[in-house]
Amino acid sequence: MIKVAFYDAKEYDRPSFEQYGRLHDIRFRFLETKLNEDTVDLAKGSDAVCVFVNDTVNAAVIDRLHEYGVRIIALRSAGYNNVDLHAAFGKVHVVHVPAYSPYAVAEHAIALLLTSVRRIHKAYNRTREFNFSLNGLTGFDFHGKTVGVIGTGKIGRIFIDICRGFGMNVIAYDLFPAKDSGIEYVLLDELFESSDIISLHCPLTEDTRHMIDAAAIGKMKKGVVIVNTSRGGLIDAEALLEGIKARKVGAACLDVYEEEADIFFEDRSGHILNDDLLSRLISMPNVIVTSHQAFLTEEALNNIAETTVGNILSFFQKDGICDNELCYRCGSIEHCKKERRQRCF
Ligand code: NAI
């Protein structure tokens, strides 16, 4: 029996993990708390921990997990910016779920975009109150507009395909442009200057943190719509708010927010929100915020559980070898791919 401490467990996580766990003799201990230095003791006696995007897996937490004999950190997410991979090297193995449903995230980005541009959220509230006026609901056609996509990996490419279906002109920027993809790559500044809509699909790294800042917004078209379903830290939220107040940014669709860790995924209704910046953004008529829900489809939840259980099993049953292990030496998956099917340490 493999024992796994499952941090930040939500109601919607349990059925799929319980089902796959039962099939493979893995016992998940569901903990509602997030993993951090104060809660790491709850992992004592576990062989593995399973964590999500807002768990804190820093050097101090990793040292304690190592001390308690935890051998593997199984991220049930694609992004891993919350894990100190270098600190993990030589101590605890880290695996993730590289893709569970890129369609879920790309489709959510489109859902946000359509909702925002066609004012569906406003229309919904109006008609519920029998207000059938159309004033203030004017949108714009997607057809013929230019969408700039930053990051053309799994999610970015699906997003691009959908945009092409709308008849949009797609331009893109990626640090590693995909060869023979038929995607028109441009420099980042050109993307900022030419796009009517900008959608972010690259990971959060030291290089990409605040890639959308005051200077970037200054280069954008007046009325630009910014969509972020990737990671909150890609956008300097204060600069975004200023851009909105200055009427430079036409709309923002945010599924992620830099300071989301203590707010998102929880029911805060009836509480006073201490984050003034988020409150102000939410109060804007042209901002839509969802609570990091882009991944939340039945298909994705099922794939997350299946892959995570597979990761844990292959680690314990195949001598520590797991295809979805992250590279500790360099913290980069791209580099690590060359060395797949070897143990990292
Ligand atoms: P991926 O790894 O397939 O693609 C990422 C792309 O970004 C790659 O093409 C890579 O070359 C590019 N990239 C890396 N550094 C860059 C840079 N400095 N500038 C521009 N491009 C750069 O990842 P995938 O699956 O498409 O996911 C993208 C992001 O979506 C993840 O990093 C994650 O943060 C986010 N995500 C959000 C979810 C949500 O529920 N909101 C769920 C899943 C992922």
Image: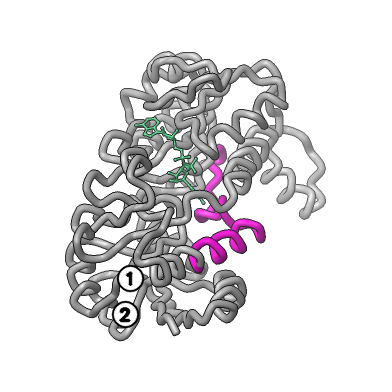
Horizontal and vertical percent for residue 14? 56, 75
Q: Nearer the viewer, mark 1 or mark 2?
A: 2
Tag 1, which secondary structure? loop
> What is the total number of numbered labels drawn onto the structure image?
2
Which residue does the image show at 23% across and 44% down from the upper left? 330
- Magenta highlight on residue 239: no
Do tag 1 and tag 2 residues touch (Cβ < 8 Å)? yes
Residue 50 in the figure: left or right of residue 119 = left
- Compare residues 126 and 219 and report the one nearer the observer: 219
Q: Give the residue type that dot 2 points to.
A: Ala
Q: Which mark is residue 43?
A: 2
Residue at the spot 40% in from the left edge and 16% down from the top edge: 187
Q: Residues within 10 Å of mark 1 (few under 14, many from 20)?
A: many
Q: Cα distance, mark 1 to mark 2?
A: 9 Å
In the figure, residue 163 lies in which quadrant? top right
Residue placed at 56% from the left, 50% from the top? Answer: 294
Mark 2 and ligand 1: say if the CB distance to the nearest ligand atom is below 8 Å: no
Label 1 belongs to which residue? 35
> Residue 38: x percent and y percent?
24, 76
Q: Residue at x 50, y 70 (%)?
A: 270
Q: What quarter of the picture does the N terminus occupy?
A: bottom left
Label 2 crowding class (10 Å Cα cut-off): few <14, some 14-19, many 20+?
many
Identify residue type, mark 1.
Leu
Where residue 262 appears, as percent x and y from the top left, is 37, 63
Q: Please, is residue 126 above or below residue 315 in the view?
A: above
Name the residue nearer the viewer: 195 or 99. 99
Q: Earlier in the sequence, mark 1 or mark 2?
A: 1
Q: Of helix, strand and loop, which one carries label 2?
A: helix
- Where's ligand 1: which quadrant? top left
Please report the bounds of the magenta region as a residue range. 285-309
